[in-house]
Image: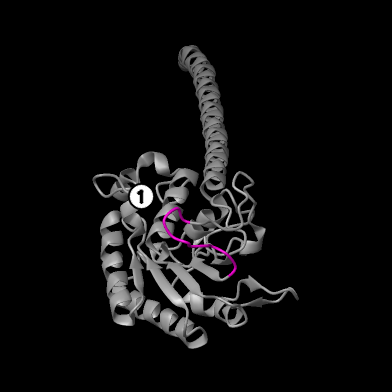
Amino acid sequence: MYKTNKKKRKSKISSSFIPLILILVIGGFIGNKIIQDANKNNNENLLNNENQITNIIQNNITKNILENNENQNSENLINNTVNEESNNAVNKNEINEDKTDKNNIKEDNSNDTDSTTSNNKNVKFDSSVAFIGDSRTQGFIMYNGLKSVQDYSYIGLMVDTAVTKKFVRTNKGEKITLLEDMANKNIKSVYIMLGVNELGWVYPQVFKKKYEDLIDEIKKIKPNCKIYVQSIIPMTKTKSDTDKVFNNSNVAKFNKLIQEVAKEKNVTYLDVKSALVDGNGNLPEEASTDGIHVDKEYCEKWLNYLKNNS
């Protein structure tokens, strides 16, 4: 009797386990299904995320390419004369220093005169005239077709590097400083425009001192040479309002220093900016593609000012 009851109990226990096993099996299947679905969803999400990231990267690459192309086009418009690369990297103050030497300038054949004579004065811009300046002066010489002048312009040139930098190429292919080259030339007048690359200098008085040193060095080698120092041309309002360095507040401050240099060194100050700015003292927006460099029309106005005031 005891054994029979024991068998019955075992049978009942076994029977009770069957549903439990079924539940576990079904539950396991459902669990696996849920896990598989979750993994599938995760994989899909990862794939979607990867696709999104890929699209972002591709878009950024495309954007960068477009920006680079736009920047390159802008640079070509800015310099119009330069086939070189890039930003002397001195500091934020420099405008694309050390791209190439001045012998790599493209010629503009729209104005092929070797010298220009003023309507009011017998001023000739020939081989006895020298121009010292940065990329703005480079554009000025090219746009006005002044092929005969002594061209001592160089992209990124400053009042200190004007004395030390060897960028003038001799007939033998060597590079020497502009002062070394001037010593061997019959130069009667020199026009200097420097200062835009120095606008970010922490100590403006250093700018003044270096400008004075440059004038002193020129006087040493050309004591009878007439020296003209030109005002810095202001920026467009758009450029000035959006740049902490290249703005017209800094330009005004440095132009005051240049006037002091001219007075103390007994050289002629030429207020070129007065012939180019609008009623508010800004370079007109249409006068520049980048807010700094001057286009052909305004370079011609610049030349007319020199002819009438030299």
Q: Main secondary structure of the magenta part?
A: loop
Q: From which residue to which does the magenta span run?
A: 118-127
Q: Is residue 126 magenta?
A: yes
Residue 200, position as x, y percentages in the image: 35, 65
Residue located 60% across and 68% down the image? 127
Residue located 73% across and 73% down the image? 171
Identify residue for label 1. Answer: 276
Say above or below: 110 vs 104.
above
Side of 78 relative to 280 (left or right): right
Q: Is residue 101 magenta?
A: no
| Quarter of the view holding residue 149 | bottom right
Whether residue 203 is visible here, answered yes or no, is no
Q: Residue furthest right?
A: 172
Residue 294, position as x, y percentages in the image: 45, 49
Q: Residue furthest bottom?
A: 220
Q: Nearer the viewer, residue 54 or 227?
A: 227
Tell me the amino acid under the disc marked 1: Leu
- Secondary structure beneath label 1: loop
